[in-house]
Amino acid sequence: MFKLISTVVVFLVCSCGPLIKKEEAVFMPKNTLLSGFEGQTLVTEEDFFRVIDLAEEIYEPIFANLGGILTMNPLWEDPTVNASASQQDGYWFVNMYGGLARRPEVTVDGFIVVLCHEIGHHLAGFPFTSSWAANEGQSDYYATQVCLRKIFAATDNRVAEVPGLPRALCDAEYTSDYDRNICNRSILAGKSTSDLIGALNNEVVFYTTQDQGTVRQTNNNHPAAQCRLDTMMAGALCDILWDDSVVPGKGVSRGAAKTAADRVACVRPTDLPQSPMDEIQLGFKPRCWYAP
């Protein structure tokens, strides 16, 4: 029914009316990392559609309960290395491009992280960048705290090789093998995605080297690759239950929005000074983008 053109501002083409201008929230900054079909990739066309179909099955009723019509646009042939979300007239769009899936950094689980990030723009809540879109850091946090757990729930989550630090962090946070396996898998998925983001500026990310930055005001732009990996690790290590019946903080004052968001996140006490690694281990949103 709809055909979307990949730009920050796009035109919605519909047989029932004129062109409608709308804004998008994109996964990563506009880039020239166009991906062709050559070379070996980790995400096949079958994987691409299978994952999107699964996410749609899980999230369609959640979106409907919140008043939105989830509209997935799987654009396999589009070489754009990005993903985006938008809303228009009750339709809540998630646009996934084949160029991103074909990048060598992107595993199947890394692709799921990006898909979950775009879902997060609709559902993750405060902090917002518009009346509806959660900001980049919040969408990353939601991806591993909430969305990956839903998608991984029906699969075998045992990972053959997990680096020492992620395994130690997950073992310390969770007592069941089921939760530990999902935590391990989520952190590895976040590393795949952060490696892709790092390719923009030749930035190398590590599990053991946290972003040392501290913002005075919450950063609504795309954080650096290391900061984004830190955020996805923290989300995987936060065991607070999410409430799918609300978008935290939507339609209320900023103070009430923060309070609502804090109810479904691991919140850093103001009198508890910690290093970035300690904060990640406790599941706090990293201060490289988030100002408590």
Image (tube, rainbow, N blue to C red):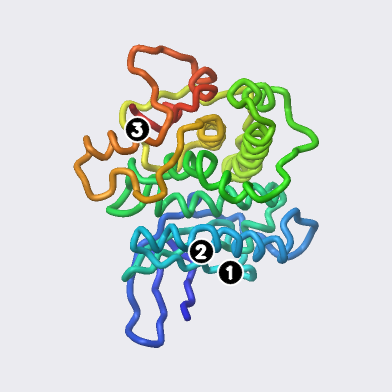
Q: Earlier in the sequence, mark 2 or mark 1?
A: 1
Give 118 or 185, whichever is nearer the viewer.
185
Q: Earlier in the sequence, mark 1 or mark 3?
A: 1
Which picture quadrant has residue 219?
top left
CA distance separating discs 1 and 3: 35 Å
Type of amino acid under label 1: Leu
Q: Dots 2 and 1: beta carbons under 8 Å? A: yes
Q: How dense is the environment of label 3, judged by Cα within 10 Å: few (below 14), some, or many (20 and up)?
A: some
Q: Position of residue 263 (x, y in %)?
A: 35, 34
The residue shown at (50%, 36%) is 224
Type of amino acid under label 2: Asn
Residue 75 numbered mark, or none: 1
Q: Is residue 53 above or below residue 20?
A: above
Q: Which residue is mark 2?
A: 95
Q: Dots 1 and 3: beta carbons under 8 Å? A: no
Q: How dense is the environment of label 1, judged by Cα within 10 Å: few (below 14), some, or many (20 and up)?
A: many
Give 219 or 111, whichever is nearer the viewer.
111
Q: Position of residue 187 (x, y in %)?
A: 63, 35
Q: Is residue 55 above or below residue 292?
A: below
Mark 3 or 2, closer to the camera: 3
Q: Position of residue 84 (x, y in %)?
A: 47, 58
